[in-house]
Image (spheres, rainbow, N blue to C red):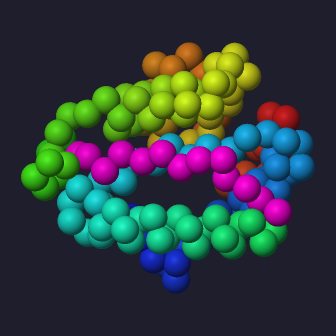
Amino acid sequence: GYVHKWRDLKFRPGVIKALKYLCQKSIKIFIATNQSGIGRGLYSKKTFFEFHKKIKTFLSKQKIFIDDVVYCPHHPKFGNGKYKKNCNCRKPKNGMIKKIINENYLNKKKITMIGDKQSDRDCAKKSNLKFYFAAKNLYKKVKKIY
């Protein structure tokens, strides 16, 4: 759905443990997320930023640190006004991934993308990145990868 309120957020099994494991291994964590809820007028950019601030605060108390969150508020059909466009950032296109790579001087050969949708996989393929679908228990998946 269009989760944008702290009370509605539910972490999937193994997510916290997986993120903690990645941080302990000094692996950078980036989030690239389609957020057409902004473009549809379901919530504002301000609400989105406040929500992610709460997530980062919650995670930091567990020694989990997200390096950056990049988002796309557009939708080619359902966006309102300036948000109704076929942009290069909305997955499956790879504008957000390019931004993360360029702004953080990352080596694509060392990047692994994990997602839960076909659009994530397609985005990774366009970016020439290794990709894995998130498993029911993300920690078990991450342990196999790293």
Viewer-nearest residue: 137 or 106 = 106
In terms of image quadrants, where is residue 47? bottom left
Residue name at image x 89 percent, y 49 percent: 24
Viewport quadrant of the N terminus = bottom left
Where is 90 relative to 33, above or below? above
Find the residue positioned furthest to the bottom: 7
Q: Is residue 144 magenta?
A: no
Residue 90 falls left or right of residue 121: left
Residue at 53% across / 65% down in the picture?
A: 52
Left or right of residue 9: residue 90: left
Instruction: State the image coordinates of residue 126 (x, y, percent, origin top left).
Output: 46, 19
Q: Quadrant of the C terminus?
A: top right
- Give the image quarter of residue 12: bottom right
- Furthest-right residue in view? 24
Residue in view at x 45 percent, y 77 percent = 5
Q: Main secondary structure of the magenta part?
A: loop
User: In this picture, is 132 found above or below 68?
Assistant: above
User: Is residue 72 rendered magenta in the image?
Assistant: yes
For the point 13% across and 55% down, the residue is: 80
Residue 15, above or below 57: above
Residues drawn in magenta: 63-75
85 with respect to 106 (left or right): left
Question: Would residue 14 be visible to someone looking at this image?
Answer: no
Q: Is residue 59 above or below residue 120?
A: below
Q: Position of residue 119 (x, y in %)?
A: 42, 36
Q: Position of residue 79 (x, y in %)?
A: 17, 52
